[in-house]
Amino acid sequence: MKTEEDFKNGQVLLIDKPLKWTSFQVVNKLRWHIRQKFGIKKIKVGHAGTLDPLATGLLIICTGKFTKKIHEYQGQEKEYIGEITLGATTPSYDLETEINETFSIEHITQDLIYSTTKQFIGEINQKPPIFSALKKDGKRLYELAREGKTTKIEPRKITIKKFEITKINLPKIQFRVVCSKGTYIRSLAYDFGVALNSGGHLSKLRRTKIGDFEVEDGMKIDEFIANL
């Protein structure tokens, strides 16, 4: 059992984030339970890299003095598995918003899907989604998007080390991606759809690795609370 001193000196907690929770909700929940357990008013708790509410998987949580290491973990390579649905786009590039446009997928073959992945491997320019937590003029982009405001977003250089198609069952494609910090898998899904001349959006996402940390070694939130 960990002590109050352990959490203050610093812990790295691997959490398997559930669907529909924001990363901040996970941090707040864990912080509240640590404070309650030890009867303390204040403890630093933070996460090392946001996961969208509709994504599940590995979230690194740091406590106490280890919150200073957050930027180190944020910079590490990440691995995801997920699903892209072709033939339709959404403004958020995932299922957070409704479908706004549909496209034919009759021309899409397995060979076309496999060959198209090659243009996304290596260092590429990627435009973040308008529904993202990036800030412009002090406001989150998703806040501006929800207000119906259009924002010019500059593309950023990212690196995709691996982009593997693991299953094809059109209109759905399952994939595995290994990528650098700053990569938006939603943008990859959207751009992949564009490259296939069809449109696409992210319909499932799970983060499986950050650096050497694996989701298999992570705990569910309830598990963490029960073992406090």
Image: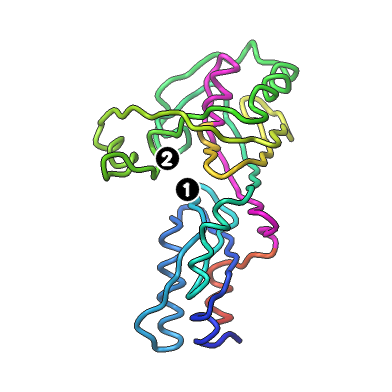
The verdict on residue 195 being magenta is yes
* Label located before the other in sequence (2 or 1): 1
Q: Position of residue 99 (x, y in %)?
A: 43, 28
Which quarter of the figure is the N terminus placed in? bottom right
Q: Position of residue 55 (x, y in %)?
A: 53, 48
Residue density around tag 1, few if under 14, some if 14–19, many if 20 or more, within 10 Å: many
**Residue at (50%, 72%) from the top-left corner?**
63
Q: Position of residue 92 (x, y in %)?
A: 42, 34
Which of the numbered marks, if any, corresponds to residue 147?
Answer: none
**Residue at (60%, 48%) from the top-left corner?**
206
The verdict on residue 192 being magenta is yes
Q: Which three-letter amino acid code belongs to the residue tagged 2? A: Glu
Q: Quadrant of residue 170?
A: top right
- Mark 2 residue element: loop
Q: Which three-letter amino acid code belongs to the residue tagged 1? A: Asp
Q: Quadrant of residue 113?
A: top right
Which quarter of the figure is the C terminus placed in? bottom right
**Residue at (60%, 42%) from the top-left corner?**
180
Which of the numbered marks, if any, corresponds to residue 52?
Answer: 1
Q: In the displayed structure, would residue 199 be above or below residue 60?
A: above
- Model colouring: rainbow
Which of the numbered marks, if any, corresponds to residue 96?
Answer: 2
18 left or right of 209?
left
Contact between marks 2 and 1 (CB within 8 A): the answer is yes
Bounds of the magenta span?
Answer: 188-216
In three-dimensional space, the C-alpha distance between marks 2 and 1, rounded to whole angstroms, equals 10 Å
**Residue at (64%, 26%) from the top-left corner?**
120
